[in-house]
Amino acid sequence: MNQKIKLLASTLLSVGLTAPAFAQDVPAAANDDVLKIGLIYTLSGPPAALGEQARDGFLLAAESLGDIGGMKTEIIVVDDEGRPDLAADKARELVQRDGVDFVVGPIFSNILMAIVQPVTSTGTILISTNAGTSTLAGEACNPNFYTTSYQNDQNHEVMGAYAESQGYQNVFLMAPNYQAGQDSLAGFKHSYTGATAGEVFTELGQLDFSSELAQIAAFQPDAVFTFMPGGMGVNLVKQYSQAGLTSIPFLSAFTVDETTLPATQDAAVGMLGGANWAPDLETEANKAFVDGYIAKYNAVPGTYAMQAYDAAQLIDSAVKKLGGDLTDRDALRAAIHEADFDSPRGDFSFGTNNFPVQDFYLVEAVKREDGMYGTSVKEKIFDDYVDNYAAQCKM
């Protein structure tokens, strides 16, 4: 890592917080000459691969940028362990004890909902690089909250639109029972008008899908649509193949991607997904990002890494515009909203709710020429797409 970037691990104790929501106050950290950034990701347990990609994507950008925003930079990495209560405590630690200027993360929507108030109520900026709940995109939008990823529904809407275009009339739907899982099926149904063969919410973290696969075998739907990130997705794809169900089209988002393909490999090749990016997207910024990531980590980056990479670029662009002076919070928010950087995904801007306006693609799992596995763009489904909740945001 660049010697100008100081990286710490945090295992601090929690402290209380009573500030009102959406505070406009200037955090004390804004007045010092060190840019402090806290990364909060799930870095243990079956979903750790997702958090590790996000962490590594951010650190790759930090290394290439050097002093982020032209300031001496300190990055503190914490593991939320997939526990909302622990995540809330660690978010308070980052803000109150460590005095960070920005909190970046998390992976899961239930973690996001646990940390958004402890972070933003102090006036600190929270940038989500993955979770994008419908509430925060709409009525609960927040001037101190931004996301470099998407609104949770959108990648799933890609697959609904694809299922619609294929004339499927009987799709089996399956997702874990938490906010992002609920958003995923809602997103699919935003753009799919056909019937459903079944709609199942599984336990978050479930690894045995024999019961659900038996239902699919019995129903024989036109296709299956699922959202199963991390280890859940690995097990589901392997069990789907072992159950002899590969003749039924398998559609997904965050189930067959660069975090699961190293484990599923050929069992997933040919499966389709919805995404806002893929490693073979043809932009100069993307080539630099993907080549740099593979060279440093010997792995193909996924969206988790790309979106965190962009968060570092976003912070860098905003802080540079202000010459390192973070005391004018309105100016800081305006500089962030300008999003003046080159994203590997190409088109990127913020909508009125601080969620991205961007393109979305149908992608396919492939074995690459270098022998590694990744996703590849098949076609663009949505162009400069604004999420369905932005009109409800009254910022």
Image (cartoon, grey):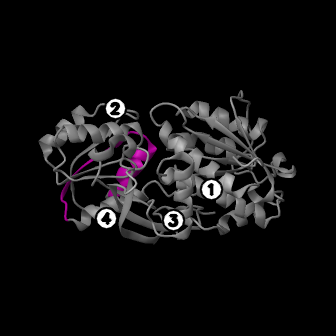
Residues at circles 1 and 2 in contact by the CB criterion of under 8 Å: no
Q: Which residue is mark 1?
A: 311
Q: Which residue is mark 4?
A: 161
User: What residue lies at 33% left-to-right and 55% top-to-bottom?
Assistant: 366
Q: Which residues are magenta?
A: 167-188
Q: Earlier in the sequence, mark 4 or mark 1?
A: 4
**Mark 3 or 4: the one toward you:** 3
User: Mark 1 belongs to which amino acid?
Assistant: Ala
User: Mark 3 belongs to which amino acid?
Assistant: Arg
Residue 85 pos. (x, y %): 58, 31
Q: Which residue is mark 2?
A: 207
**Mark 3 or 2: the one toward you:** 3
Q: How far separated are the C-alphas under marks 3 and 4?
A: 21 Å
Q: Which residue is mark 3?
A: 345
Q: Secondary structure at mark 2?
A: loop
Residue 137 pos. (x, y %): 53, 57
